[in-house]
Amino acid sequence: MSSSLTIERDNIRKLFPDTFNQARKGRRKGQIFFFLILLYLIVGFFTLDVVNIPKKWKPQNAAMFALDTYAHKDHVTMKWENHDDIKIAFEGNYRSVYGKDNLDKSIPDWFYKKSDNVGYVVEFNNKGKAILYKDRVEIVNFPKYERDFTIKLNTNGKPYLVGSEDLVIEDLKGFRITENRVEFRPTLYERIQVYPKKVEIHRYSIGWKYFWFDFSSPLEPYSFFEALGLTFSKDRVVPEMSNLKLFLTEIKDNDAFMHGRVWWAMLETIVMAVLGTMFATVMALPLSFLAAYNVTPIKALRFTLRRLFDTLRGIDFLIWSLIFLRAFGPGPFTGIFAIGFTDTGTLGKLYSEAIENTEKKQQEGVQSTGASKFLQHRFGIIPQILPIFVSQSLYYLESNTRGAVIIGAMGAGGIGLQFLGALGTGNDFENVAYMAILVLAVVIFMDRLSAWLRRILIGSDQLIVR
Amino acid sequence: MSKALPANLEQIEVNLKKLTNQRTRSSLLGIAILILVFFGGTLISLEANAGSFGRGIANFFNYPRDLFVDTFEMGWKYWPRVIKYIPELIITLNIALFSTSIGFVLAVIFAIFSSRNLIRNKRVIQFTKFFMDVTRSFPTLIIAMVFLYLMGKSSLPAVIAITIHTAGALGKLFTEAIENCDGKPIEGLSSVGATWTQKIRFSVLPQVLPLFLSYGILRLEINVRESTILGFVGAGGIGEMLAALIQWNYGADVLACMFLLVGTIIALDYLSAYWRHKLIGVNQ
């Protein structure tokens, strides 16, 4: 059986030698191509320093960054010279200090005086405690630690861990001791630092605190929904304005998350994308007709327009935005024109190809009724290409939203610039995360919107090419 | 019958009129919305823009003119300048090519796990699709900026950002390609007892590979632009050089970089159209 099959195969091979050789040649070509790519990847691996990723990757930085995007911290600071003057500040900011008289902000309940009135207790979320005395700091009750610790100042005024010489290395995990500092950080969420002059404690909790109302807002004691409920009540929280107005302005002027500014910037970015796409569509529409051979008989005009499209597209929107940035200054106009010019090239090319691919019969049908050239195009071509136009333009809306964010970051304003600003401060990573999520949400929304519009306008959300 | 026909015709005419009216109404509504969006957007732009619109239009040609004047003053000494920036251009191209290749491989893996005709488990498909949506929607700039912050100045953040975005964007296109491919070869292989990997290798891959490569080449072109932009915010290559030159106001050098960039992009544009034409026979 098998031998007869082999004979048959050999016969076929003899009958059609070219077919088999071609297949082998194709395979050889594929193998060479694959090998070249592999070779390039190895070269790229070294030239682009990919091998050094582990060296460049600073896990400490990344962990701090990640921690700060979803958690917030309170600083407790005590100066050795004045034991009773303890400052508790949100994120260590001097403007958000708890218990400062003018702000009438109550002390958080994780901070209290010890029952015998000699020490202050800072209680962490994991039930561990740091107790601040006049002459020492006690670290007690930390989970996974069998014993308590005491940190004191020696005669030279330097901090030291009492009895550290008796401890083995395992007991000391979480401690970092240098000449001028004793630091205890059992996990990322608790940090106690003792210096010759002061003690500083960072207490982390999960969540974005003050997301709706900032530290000094009169609405801060209420949650979002409580405050929303208050807007229906007649009793004013502050005498100057109604509760609804207060509610809105407090959210807008929140100085931690800056909702007002961020949303305005987001709006600018969306305007850039939408108007840029509109501009490109309006420009490309007539030009594409002039560049299509079945509409325009003049070859020189067609050639010129084709090269114009190529040039507009080839001068990438990076360069366009640099030029417009000089002319218009930072603002949406830069983005609108940069996107508009680049996409006039892209859409013009796509549109004119679509026009050239239209069915000729419909145009001839209109022509047979004695219609003018203009009417022939109006009723013979436009109905055929309109869905393609709409589909292409909407398709570019989503990628232009991403482009607008990028142009913004290069100086045109909008959410891109806000994002760079927040990243640049080096400690507002919750804002960075907030804006990143916002951008992600808006881009996904634009994507869905354009798919939805394409579906209701032309019955299919796939990109129609011809 | 002879009586019914006119009645029917009347009915048709009434229906036609109704449809036309409806069409006109929705067209008008659409146009009204567009006009509203246009004016709203313009108002917002006027409010938000630093310089005025009129002055911007008037100033539009100033900067390009300055650049050209600077260049002409240099005369023949100009060309060595242009050549000087080619190494920077190669860095940018390297970033783009490398991250496109890696992203391509990742995209193929994603696409296999999100295609309905290859994977039975609906959860896996939904998760992969969602994952691709997220990676695709982040502007590369945002990922690159975060990694630049964490890793310090180098080209790596650009590579990471473009790779992530490419994996998502290509993955979506690849999924569509796999889902639209002919099911009969798969059935044929099933009938002779092929394993899952063999089915993919001998029935799916031959059908979709030309399309994959074509999309990959298109992506490469886009990624060259992206890597230039990421260079502009600090990821190295010609973008970074351009940013520095603009800051120092070296007009002729700025124009040299721009020429190189535009030349590369146009060349790539033609090359990719040519390659794709060879691969799948059409331009799109």
Image (spheres, rainbow, N blue to C red):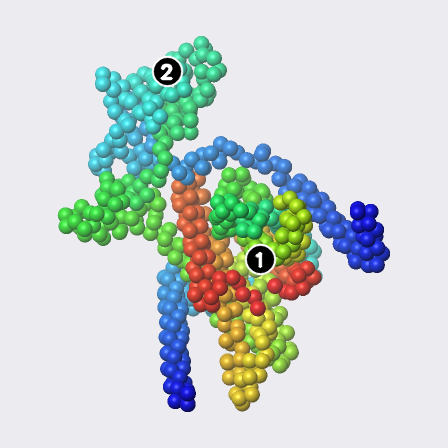
User: Extreme front residue here?
Assistant: A1
- Secondary structure beneath label 2: loop
Q: Which residue is at a point 39% across and 24% down the rendered structure image?
A: A193
Q: How crowded is mark 2: few (under 14 residues within 10 Å), some or many (20 or more)?
A: few
**Residue A395 placement, left or right of B87:** left
Q: Which residue is at a point 50% across and 72% down the rendered structure image?
A: A386
Q: Quadrant of the C terminus of chain A?
A: bottom right
Give whichever of B46, A341 is nearer the camera. A341
Q: Is residue A244 at all visible to an observer of this figure?
A: yes
Q: Is residue B93 at all visible to an observer of this figure?
A: no
Q: Mark number for residue B180?
A: 1
What is the x, y in percent for residue A281? Answer: 49, 69
Q: Do labels 2 and 1 share a chain?
A: no
- What residue would you read off at disc 2? A148
User: Extreme left residue here?
Assistant: A235
Residue type, numbered disc 2: Asp
**Residue A129 placement, left or right of A15:** left
Chain name for mark 1: B
